Amino acid sequence: MKSALCWFFIGFVIPNLPWWSFAKSSSNDSEQAILRLHAQARQGHLRGDAELIAAGVADRFINLQNGSLESQTREQLRQKFSTYLGHVKYSEWNDVIQPSVHVSRDGTMAWTAINIKARFIDLTEPSPRQEHEFTSSWIAVYEKQASGWRMVGMSSGCEPACGSRREQK
């Protein structure tokens, strides 16, 4: 009988307590906010708009890629993407699988696992330009700041190498 009462309490009473519902809805709101930032980054790539990408990033950002670690400001990241997006035009930047979002219990940190497929042309190539394709996956870390959720770090990889053919030379 104690076991049945215990399961009733765990399965029915706790999930129906007001604080449990708040924590669950707060986590869901956070997940949706982070997915909106991911959608915003997608639009930034497709539109060639570095501002859209940089808007979701914290004042300082850590990037781990291809065995190197780089710390940069939001402005440095925006400038880097502005230059890069001035040389390429994306025709596709889509999720291969639904992004996975995980929010910490206290609601201050989160991480996502992302896997995309992208197609682009390199505008610096002579005509006719070839379309290039890559898949990329990454783990991104987010922090809830006064201005909302912001990406503070990322570790990523691509196959073949990300971005423009210029980077492969």
Image (tube, rainbow, N blue to C red):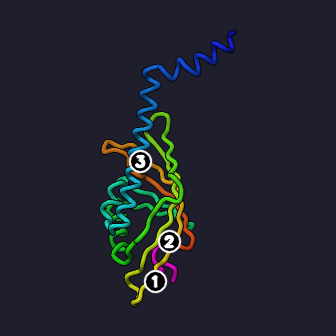
Q: CA distance from mark 1 to mark 2?
A: 15 Å
Say whether marks 1 and 2 touch (CB < 8 Å).
no
Q: Which badge, 2 or 3, comes first in the chain's sequence?
A: 3
Please say whether residue 165 is one of the residues in the magenta stretch.
yes
Instruction: Single out the mark in the foreground, 1 or 3.
Output: 1
Q: Position of residue 7 (x, y in %)?
A: 63, 18
Q: Secondary structure at mark 2?
A: loop
In-front residue for pair 104/41: 41
Q: Which residue is mark 3?
A: 34
Q: Which residue is mark 2?
A: 162
Residue positioned 53% across, 17% down in the render: 13
**Could you tell whether 44 is left or right of 111 in the image?**
left
Residue type (three-letter) at the residue carrying disc 2: Cys
Residue positioned 50% across, 65% down in the render: 117
Q: CA distance from mark 2 to mark 3?
A: 23 Å
Q: Position of residue 5 (x, y in %)?
A: 63, 12
Residue type (three-letter) at the residue carrying disc 3: Ile
Residue type (three-letter) at the residue carrying disc 1: Gln
Q: Position of residue 77 (x, y in %)?
A: 37, 64
Q: Which residues are magenta?
A: 162-169
Which labelled disc corresponds to residue 2? none
Q: Which residue is mark 1?
A: 130
